[in-house]
Image (tube, helix red, strand yellow):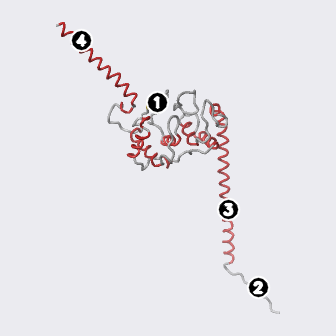
Amino acid sequence: MKKLSARRRHPLAAVVVLLLALAATGGLYAAFAPADKAQADETAQSLAIEEGKKLYAVGCASCHGTGGQGSTDGPPLAGVGAAAVDFQVGTGRMPMVAQGAQAPKKKVVYTQAQIDQLAAFVSSLGAGPSIPTKDQYSPSGADIGNGGELFRNNCAQCHNFTGQGGALTDGKYAPKLQGVSQKHLYEAMTTGPQNMPSFPDTIMPEKDKKDIIAYINAVNGDKTVNNGGLTLGGLGPVSEGLFAWIFGLGALIVVAIWVAARTAKAKKS
């Protein structure tokens, strides 16, 4: 019988085995790492919802109901979305101190982390507009001219053409827009707080919202220079009408008295 000669291992065999081992390790990581990350995100979201539910029970449930179903003191919250919570709570309008025709802007009582938790809980009640990213509301590269046209057509009737606000009916009002953050301006257009109509992307695309924000910053921003002096024209039709009645009518009365006095003197002489 012939002796079977031992097989000689190829010199590159060890390298091939090492590469296969590395590939298998990478495959296992690719298979399990995304699942781990998704599970971690889901856990963090669940914790945020749970913490938000606790905050909601203390500060919101008395008006909006324990499950967000609403009551005679507050509307239902299912479907309003995280953006509505971020706007209302982030501007201090909620929680309200007392019932009234409109919730005024006031000092914020929650931290941003708590606001995010409240938003997470309210979002779990029903899908709605999400909190916008900086890319969505940043006016960088926006068309101010188009924003001005859109603002005059959709917003000036209540907020005045420079965003100084104005009076509405039954004690309601359109607030002035000076000093309002870009994020809150975007959220207001998306969610329609108080008496304002909402403008979702299907009605007003994201680009148009950015153009409007750019216009507001241009005519009513913190660094806006007013070369006209007295800004009576920016106060709204109610204030302008009141000015006309008081000073215009008052001037006519003064002139009438002066004419009457001169006429009386002329008759005596």
Who comes first in sequence, dot 4 or dot 3?
3
The amino acid type, in three-letter code, at marker 2 is Ala
Q: Image check: 35 left or right of 112?
A: right
The amino acid type, in three-letter code, at marker 1 is Leu
Who comes first in sequence, dot 2 or dot 1?
2
Who comes first in sequence, dot 3 or dot 2?
2
The answer to whether 45 is drawn above or below residue 195 in the figure is below
Spatial CA distance of label 1 from label 3 is 59 Å
Crowding at dot 2, Cα within 10 Å, few <14 / some 14-19 / many 20+, comes out as few
Who comes first in sequence, dot 1 or dot 4?
1
Residue 229, how many percent across, how many down? 33, 32
Residue under numbered circle 3: 31
The amino acid type, in three-letter code, at marker 4 is Ala
Q: Tell me the number on the disc at residue 6.
A: 2
Residue under numbered circle 4: 261
The answer to whether 204 is drawn above or below residue 63 in the figure is below
Q: Residue at x 62, y 30 (%)?
A: 72
Who comes first in sequence, dot 2 or dot 4?
2
Q: Residue at x 47, y 38 (%)?
A: 180
Task: In the displayed orientation, state which residue is furthest to the top.
Answer: 268
Task: In the displayed orientation, state which residue is furthest to the left.
Answer: 269
The answer to whether 156 is drawn above or below residue 254 in the figure is below
**Disc number lying in front (1 or 3):** 1
- Front in this rendered view, residue 181 or 67: 67
